[in-house]
Image: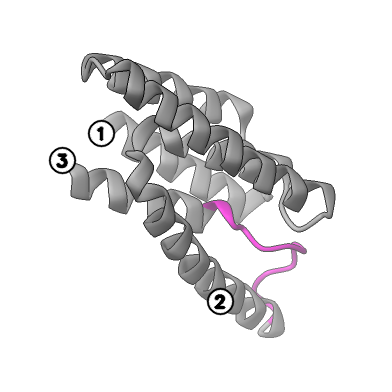
Amino acid sequence: MAVLGLTLGRIAWSDITRRIVPNRDIALVAIFGLINLLTKEPSIAEWLDRLVVLVGFGLVLLGLFATGKLGGGDVKLMLTAPLWLAPVDIIPFIVLLSLGGALVAIGTLVMMRLGYHKQPGVPYAVAICAALIFLVARAY
Protein backbone atom coordinates (compact mmCIF):
# COMPACT_ATOMS: atom_id res chain seq x y z
CA MET A 1 0.00 0.00 0.00
CA ALA A 2 2.91 2.38 0.66
CA VAL A 3 4.15 1.79 -2.88
CA LEU A 4 0.69 2.69 -4.18
CA GLY A 5 0.66 5.92 -2.18
CA LEU A 6 4.14 6.92 -3.32
CA THR A 7 3.42 6.10 -6.95
CA LEU A 8 0.12 7.98 -6.93
CA GLY A 9 1.85 10.92 -5.26
CA ARG A 10 4.43 10.96 -8.04
CA ILE A 11 1.68 10.78 -10.67
CA ALA A 12 -0.20 13.69 -9.09
CA TRP A 13 2.97 15.79 -8.88
CA SER A 14 3.84 15.05 -12.51
CA ASP A 15 0.36 16.08 -13.62
CA ILE A 16 0.52 19.31 -11.60
CA THR A 17 3.96 20.30 -12.86
CA ARG A 18 4.04 18.89 -16.39
CA ARG A 19 0.46 17.86 -17.23
CA ILE A 20 1.80 14.37 -17.93
CA VAL A 21 0.67 11.10 -16.38
CA PRO A 22 3.66 8.80 -16.96
CA ASN A 23 2.85 5.40 -18.47
CA ARG A 24 5.57 3.83 -16.31
CA ASP A 25 3.76 4.90 -13.15
CA ILE A 26 0.36 3.80 -14.46
CA ALA A 27 1.90 0.40 -15.21
CA LEU A 28 3.22 0.21 -11.63
CA VAL A 29 -0.22 1.00 -10.20
CA ALA A 30 -1.75 -1.68 -12.44
CA ILE A 31 0.89 -4.32 -11.69
CA PHE A 32 0.72 -3.79 -7.93
CA GLY A 33 -3.08 -3.74 -8.14
CA LEU A 34 -3.05 -7.09 -9.90
CA ILE A 35 -0.61 -8.51 -7.33
CA ASN A 36 -2.80 -7.15 -4.53
CA LEU A 37 -5.87 -8.72 -6.10
CA LEU A 38 -4.18 -12.09 -6.62
CA THR A 39 -3.10 -12.26 -2.96
CA LYS A 40 -6.78 -12.10 -2.00
CA GLU A 41 -7.51 -15.21 -4.08
CA PRO A 42 -10.70 -13.88 -5.70
CA SER A 43 -13.40 -16.28 -6.85
CA ILE A 44 -14.41 -16.63 -10.50
CA ALA A 45 -17.53 -14.58 -9.72
CA GLU A 46 -15.42 -11.74 -8.32
CA TRP A 47 -13.17 -11.80 -11.40
CA LEU A 48 -16.26 -11.61 -13.62
CA ASP A 49 -17.71 -8.74 -11.56
CA ARG A 50 -14.47 -6.80 -11.91
CA LEU A 51 -14.31 -7.55 -15.63
CA VAL A 52 -17.86 -6.27 -16.16
CA VAL A 53 -17.05 -3.11 -14.19
CA LEU A 54 -13.81 -2.65 -16.12
CA VAL A 55 -15.51 -3.00 -19.51
CA GLY A 56 -18.43 -0.72 -18.60
CA PHE A 57 -16.19 1.87 -16.99
CA GLY A 58 -13.78 1.59 -19.92
CA LEU A 59 -16.51 2.30 -22.47
CA VAL A 60 -17.62 5.42 -20.60
CA LEU A 61 -14.01 6.61 -20.31
CA LEU A 62 -13.39 5.88 -23.99
CA GLY A 63 -16.30 8.15 -24.84
CA LEU A 64 -14.90 10.91 -22.64
CA PHE A 65 -11.47 10.51 -24.23
CA ALA A 66 -12.91 10.49 -27.77
CA THR A 67 -14.74 13.76 -27.12
CA GLY A 68 -11.65 15.41 -25.63
CA LYS A 69 -13.04 15.62 -22.10
CA LEU A 70 -10.26 13.47 -20.59
CA GLY A 71 -6.64 12.85 -21.49
CA GLY A 72 -5.26 9.42 -22.27
CA GLY A 73 -3.19 9.25 -19.08
CA ASP A 74 -6.22 10.06 -16.94
CA VAL A 75 -8.25 7.35 -18.67
CA LYS A 76 -5.50 4.75 -18.23
CA LEU A 77 -5.05 5.69 -14.58
CA MET A 78 -8.79 5.41 -13.89
CA LEU A 79 -8.85 1.99 -15.53
CA THR A 80 -6.50 0.71 -12.81
CA ALA A 81 -9.18 1.39 -10.16
CA PRO A 82 -11.05 -1.93 -10.60
CA LEU A 83 -7.82 -3.74 -9.71
CA TRP A 84 -7.72 -1.98 -6.35
CA LEU A 85 -11.38 -1.43 -5.55
CA ALA A 86 -14.26 -3.84 -5.09
CA PRO A 87 -16.99 -3.40 -7.72
CA VAL A 88 -19.27 -1.76 -5.12
CA ASP A 89 -16.62 0.94 -4.59
CA ILE A 90 -16.62 2.16 -8.19
CA ILE A 91 -19.63 4.47 -7.68
CA PRO A 92 -18.07 6.07 -4.55
CA PHE A 93 -14.84 6.37 -6.59
CA ILE A 94 -16.69 8.26 -9.33
CA VAL A 95 -18.41 10.53 -6.78
CA LEU A 96 -15.12 11.34 -5.00
CA LEU A 97 -13.46 11.80 -8.36
CA SER A 98 -16.13 14.27 -9.48
CA LEU A 99 -15.98 16.30 -6.28
CA GLY A 100 -12.19 16.27 -6.21
CA GLY A 101 -12.04 17.12 -9.90
CA ALA A 102 -14.28 20.14 -9.35
CA LEU A 103 -12.03 21.36 -6.53
CA VAL A 104 -8.90 20.84 -8.64
CA ALA A 105 -10.51 22.68 -11.57
CA ILE A 106 -11.51 25.62 -9.37
CA GLY A 107 -8.05 25.73 -7.79
CA THR A 108 -6.40 25.61 -11.21
CA LEU A 109 -8.57 28.46 -12.51
CA VAL A 110 -7.77 30.59 -9.46
CA MET A 111 -4.04 29.91 -9.82
CA MET A 112 -4.17 30.76 -13.53
CA ARG A 113 -6.06 34.00 -12.85
CA LEU A 114 -3.49 35.00 -10.25
CA GLY A 115 -0.70 34.28 -12.70
CA TYR A 116 0.85 31.44 -10.70
CA HIS A 117 0.05 28.73 -13.18
CA LYS A 118 0.71 29.08 -16.89
CA GLN A 119 0.02 25.56 -18.19
CA PRO A 120 -3.37 24.99 -19.81
CA GLY A 121 -5.62 22.17 -18.69
CA VAL A 122 -6.66 20.71 -15.38
CA PRO A 123 -4.38 18.24 -13.56
CA TYR A 124 -7.25 15.76 -13.14
CA ALA A 125 -4.88 12.97 -12.07
CA VAL A 126 -4.66 14.75 -8.69
CA ALA A 127 -8.35 13.99 -8.06
CA ILE A 128 -8.01 10.46 -9.43
CA CYS A 129 -5.06 9.72 -7.13
CA ALA A 130 -6.76 11.24 -4.08
CA ALA A 131 -9.98 9.27 -4.62
CA LEU A 132 -8.10 6.02 -5.16
CA ILE A 133 -5.85 6.50 -2.12
CA PHE A 134 -8.84 7.36 0.08
CA LEU A 135 -10.89 4.32 -0.93
CA VAL A 136 -8.00 1.86 -0.83
CA ALA A 137 -6.95 3.14 2.61
CA ARG A 138 -10.54 2.84 3.83
CA ALA A 139 -10.65 -0.80 2.71
CA TYR A 140 -7.54 -1.70 4.76
Q: Amino acid at mark 1?
A: Ala
Q: Quadrant of the C terminus?
A: top left
Q: Which one is nearer the viewer's eye here, 115 or 77? A: 77
Q: Amino acid at mark 3?
A: Tyr
| Disc 3 to disc 1: CB gap under 8 Å | no
**Element under disc 1:** helix
Task: Please report the bounds of the magenta region as a residue range.
Answer: 115-125
**Element under disc 3:** loop
Q: Residue furthest left?
A: 140
Mark 3 vs 2, N-terminal side:
2
Q: Is residue 9 above or below residue 93?
A: above
Who's the residue at 61% across and 58% down the image? 123
Q: Residues within 10 Å of mark 1 (few under 14, many from 20)?
A: few
Q: CA distance from mark 1 to mark 2?
A: 27 Å
Residue 14 in view here: yes
Q: CA distance from mark 3 to mark 1?
A: 12 Å
Instruction: Please tell me whether mark 3 or mark 1 is closer to you in this view.
Output: 3
Q: Which residue is mark 2?
A: 107
Q: Amino acid at mark 2?
A: Gly
Mark 1 vs 2, N-terminal side:
1
Q: Position of residue 115 (x, y in %)?
A: 70, 79
Q: Which residue is mark 3?
A: 140
Residue 102 falls within the magenta-colored stretch:
no
Q: Which one is nearer the viewer's eye here, 66 or 102? A: 66
Q: Main secondary structure of the magenta part?
A: loop
Q: Position of residue 7 (x, y in %)?
A: 41, 35
Who's the residue at 36% across and 34% down the image? 84
Q: Is residue 72 above or below residue 13?
A: above
